[in-house]
Amino acid sequence: MENTGPAIETKKLTKTYGEGRTKVNALKSVDLAVNKGELLAIMGPSGSGKTTLLMILGLVTVPTEGTLVLDGDNIYNGRARDFQKLRREKIGFIFQFSNLIPFLTAEENIMLPMDLVGVPSQKARSRARELLDYLEVTGRAHELPERLSGGERQRVAIARALANRPAMILADEPTASLDTDRGLSVMRLLRQLSTEQGTAILVVTHDERMIGEVDRVLQLVDGAVVSDESQTKAGSPVSKDPPQGASQSAAKPPESTVQVET
């Protein structure tokens, strides 16, 4: 099905903690739209509101004011919502560390989010194998996380985030613990995935080394957006429109030059 709008859109998103003299405005009237197929970096100093924004976009924290539309669905429209179900179906999460479940194999870790939304086991296993093949770790399907290299664990964690074909993936400091080469390889892989899978990927990061790999950079200071700028790749401006015909299929693309640490 063709993508016709942003994966995520907010209007005047605000989050306030406390009252009176203890009141803190953690997020101040944030307007944001991210298309499917777009890779956005959210940056800013500590205390700028990055984590608060990520928690609201991930449906973990409820905003004090404002609207949030996820994949065409107005989340805070007065109806009772099952946020846990929405997170499982619409959002993928990638963390600084892989957070794989240690007693499940790579394949089972990828199957888990599908199991939680009721995907039949055979279909979930088939999807997991497609993703393992797509991310070039097919031969590690039956290994426990402790037997995987750091790069393999990263790929399995990314495959898990893609399992339910989410409209959006939120990545929290995915390169913070990596050296420059490995960090860049992860960002290039995320960029490849956003384009080929037609998924909006939002990366919260302090790592300015990674800016050249993203489509846009959103800068937050004291809870407010101070800039929202497209990046330039190979001398050409990056379009904010989603790729035409971007597929959510897990079919393996043509040979890729993107490499992740093995």
Image (tube, rainbow, N blue to C red):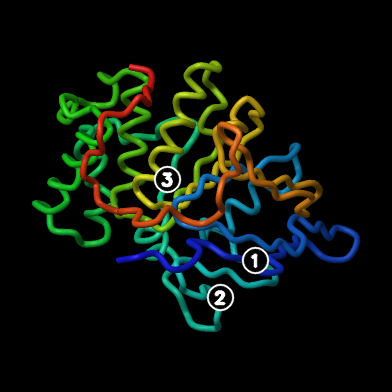
**Is label 3 or label 2 in front?**
3
Look at label 3 and name its amino acid. Answer: Ser
The numbered mark at residue 209 is none
**Looking at numbered disc 2 in the image, what kind of residue is underneath it?**
Tyr
Report the residue that reaches farthest toward the bottom: 78
Query: Of callouts 3 and 2, which one flags the residue occurring earlier in the amino acid sequence?
Result: 2
Q: Position of residue 57 (x, y in %)?
A: 55, 58
Secondary element type, mark 3: helix
Spatial CA span between label 3 and label 2: 26 Å
Badge 3 local density, few (<14 within 10 Å), some, or many (20+)? Answer: many
For image coordinates 49% across by 83% down, the residue present is 79
**Alpha carbons under labels 1 and 2: distance apart:** 9 Å
Which residue in the structure is indicated by mark 2? Answer: 76
Residue 232: image quadrant is top right
Q: In the shown orientation, is residue 248 left or right of residue 76?
A: left
Q: Earlier in the sequence, mark 1 or mark 2?
A: 1
Where residue 251 appears, as percent x and y from the top left, is 21, 44
Viewer-nearest of labels 3 and 1?
3
Contact? badges 1 and 2 (CB < 8 Å): yes
Question: Do callouts 3 and 1 mark residues in contact (Cβ within 8 Å)?
Answer: no
Determine which of the numbered discs, if any, sits on residue 63 in the image: 1
Residue 194 got which mark?
3
Q: Secondary structure at mark 2?
A: loop
Q: Residue at x 24, y 32 (%)?
A: 103
What's the CA distance linking mark 3 and mark 1? 27 Å
